[in-house]
Amino acid sequence: MSDRSPSARVLVLGGARSGKSAFAEAVLTDAPSVRYLATAVVDPADHDFADRIAVHRDRRPAHWTTVENAEPATVLATGAPATLLDDIGTWLTARLDARAAWDAPRGTVTPDCDMLVEAVAAYRERLVIVSPEVGMGVIPATRSGRLFRDEIGTLNQRLARACDEAYLIVAGLPLRLK
């Protein structure tokens, strides 16, 4: 990673518990300030998810600024010295919920995805994006599972084209794709 320019847009893909967030955070350890865009919406009744979020919070350096539950395209338009967006899968789930699109035709969230991809392509500061790679497993048994897999797969392809670098994290090990 030493050949990375300071303004590179980096996409970090990986499965659940692959180490993708930790890798993404390490990419920005030399940045004097970082804006962390957290897309998770906390459900106080979901203690397991709250614990996961706490681990992420505790791991971040104290000088990082956190923006929670944000619309990434809007926030990216404001610029910042460096930004980490974690994660696209949680954001996409919230967009599918907001548009009541779980039973709608594929592509219903395309306008949201278009805005995000355009914001990423236009972003000129350091940007690291974390997204799940879910297309390597079995075909989901439910329509909503297949919808999510298809939408995130298409979005990941578009983000990879808009980014300068892309990594796949497996078992905590990065594989540079681009």
Image (spheres, helix red, strand yellow):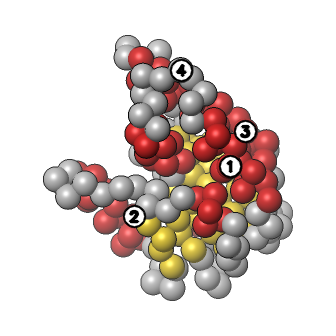
Disc 4 crowd rating (10 Å Cα; few below 14, some 14-19, many 20+) is few
Percent coordinates x, y for residue 129 in the rendering: 62, 55
Of the numbered discs in the image, which one, if any, rests on residue 53? none
> Distance between the Cα atoms at labels 1 and 2?
26 Å
> Which residue, as the protein is rendered here, is positioned at the far left?
45
Quick check: marks 4 and 2 in contact, CB under 8 Å? no
Whether residue 2 is visible: no
Q: Quadrant of residue 123?
A: bottom right
Sequence order check, earlier mark of 4 and 2? 2
> Distance between the Cα atoms at labels 4 and 3?
19 Å
Q: Which residue is mark 1?
A: 115
Q: Which residue is mark 4?
A: 105
Quick check: marks 3 and 1 in contact, CB under 8 Å? no
Quick check: marks 2 and 3 in contact, CB under 8 Å? no
Of the numbered discs in the image, which one, if any, rests on residue 158? 3
Q: In the rendered structure, which amino acid carries the disc numbered 2?
A: His
Instruction: Give the answer, above or below, for where 126 lies relative to 73.
Output: below
Q: Nearer the viewer, residue 134 or 98?
A: 98
Of the numbered discs in the image, which one, if any, rests on residue 56? 2
Instruction: Give the answer, above or below, for where 14 lies relative to 49.
Output: above
